[in-house]
Image: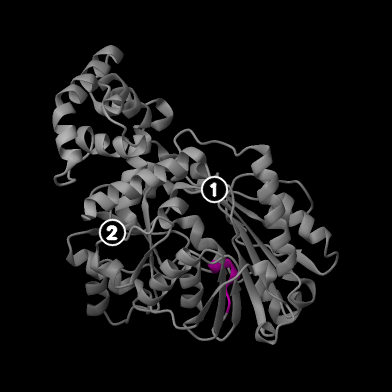
Amino acid sequence: MGLMWLLYAALAGVLAGVESRPGSIKGLVYSSNFQNVKQLYALVCETQRYSAVLDAVISSAGLLSAKKLQPHLAKGRVYELLLGKGFRGGGGRWKALLGRHQARLKAELARLKVHRGVSRNEDLLEVGSRPGPASQLPRFVRVNTLKTCSDDVVDYFKRQGFSYQGRASSLDDLRALKGKHFLLDSLMPELLVFPAQTDLHEHPLYRAGHLILQDRASCLPAMLLDPPPGSHVIDACAAPGNKTSHLAALLKNQGKIFAFDLDAKRLASMATLLARAGVSCCELAEEDFRAVSPSDPRYREVHYILLDPSCSGSGMPSRQLEEPGAGTPSPVCLHALAGFQQRALCHALTFPSLQRLVYSTCSLCQEENEDVVQDALQQNPGAFRLAPALPAWPHRGLSTFPGAEHCLRASPETTLSGGFVAVIERVEVRDSASQAKASAPERTPSPAPKRKKRQQRAAAGACTPPCT
């Protein structure tokens, strides 16, 4: 059986799953067993965008009435024929069938354009399905300090013809990126920013694990947890593993990360990611974190927990690419998610040696964010409090309870990606040295990697520039 046939079969399975709504496109793609996840995901998203157009063309051309054809498989094949890279499925019955109907399908597509008064395929899309903010977001890339450093990565890209613009001073700098220009993020010293649509999946530094493709808001939780090297850390809902690899980089592979997730296939992909990133301090477990015993001796030295549970994803601009027009989740869905999140957070707070916990979501919904945190704190009166984090961050928690302003919110409009982060720590560790630790994430940014001419001038001068 050919690779392209397997691709189309996997596509049909995911499209059928989306229609019955058992999960997100990304989850369905990961569970499809198709080897090239990126290829399948891209094809599914594009087919979904044009779903209404394809349904209209297929119906008008009478394709499904010709023979008993699987409609989702037909949709994928017709997408490739009319809107993609052309039919690439080899020989067999599909080649003969599409060959017989090709002229009719193309004629129906042309007729649809005339009927709607448009000339481009993209103009056939409904407003909610057209490329929106998600497709215009910059590409964020975290430098994996287990394998390299920002200076070396910057120099590598400069040798490839990219122009390094130094540290960004505002979000406008990030939005204005074009061509082969790139910047250092204004807040995170290991986060590089490239223009929208920059594809680095095949870049040698990515394939070697020197770069992690991770958006801005996703980098906040590990940065704010800030475990020192040698610490024992739990990553409670770990897959797909970007935050876990970030924790390992902060630990410098010294210490221990206990990473839990229930999805075996996502854990397998995560193991591959961690191996590529050079992570050696992580122990993966296919287990529900809520079933993990806090009294287990293995976790007696766990002082740090990162809890990033399943959520609605309402703050993810990329969700619009998966589900065009997707908005606020239903009250029933929100209630179920918030219940799961609240139970997971309360369980995490029962670990006896816990000093600091970061709770994060990629949701904008109060029910999954402030309400979950407030409930957990109320169930542990006097034991934990919210620690102030990044006071200069522009978007704070909703004022739903005293102290909520210590939480961070991110939105696509104000920070280019959406989410929520709360830093919770045990009250008794706020004294002496740990008081300073509460504000540790509000670091002074390290000097940006210098541009070449400035490095040359510094090298020629009497003073040696500081290491970065």
Residue 99 screen position, x and y as percent: 14, 32
Q: CA distance from mark 2 to mark 1?
A: 24 Å
Image position of 400 with respect to 437: above or below: above
Determine crowd level at label 1: few under 14, some 14-19, many 20+ residues with C-alpha closer than 10 A: many
Residue 109's image quarter? top left
Could you say which disc has been placed on residue 75 in the image? none
Residue 62 screen position, x and y as percent: 27, 22
Residue labelled with disc 2: 200
Please name the amino acid that badge 1 sits on. Answer: Gly
Figure quadrant of the C terminus: bottom left
Residue 414 screen position, x and y as percent: 51, 45
| First along the sequence among labels 2 and 1 | 2
Residue 191's image quarter? bottom left
Please name the amino acid that badge 2 sits on. Answer: Leu
Instruction: Tell which of 386 and 313 is nearer to you.
Output: 313
For the residue labelled by badge 1, is the local secondary structure a helix, a strand or a loop?
A: loop
Residue labelled with disc 1: 313
Q: Is residue 211 visible?
A: yes
Magenta-tinted stretch: 222-227
Residue plotted at (64% across, 75% down): 304
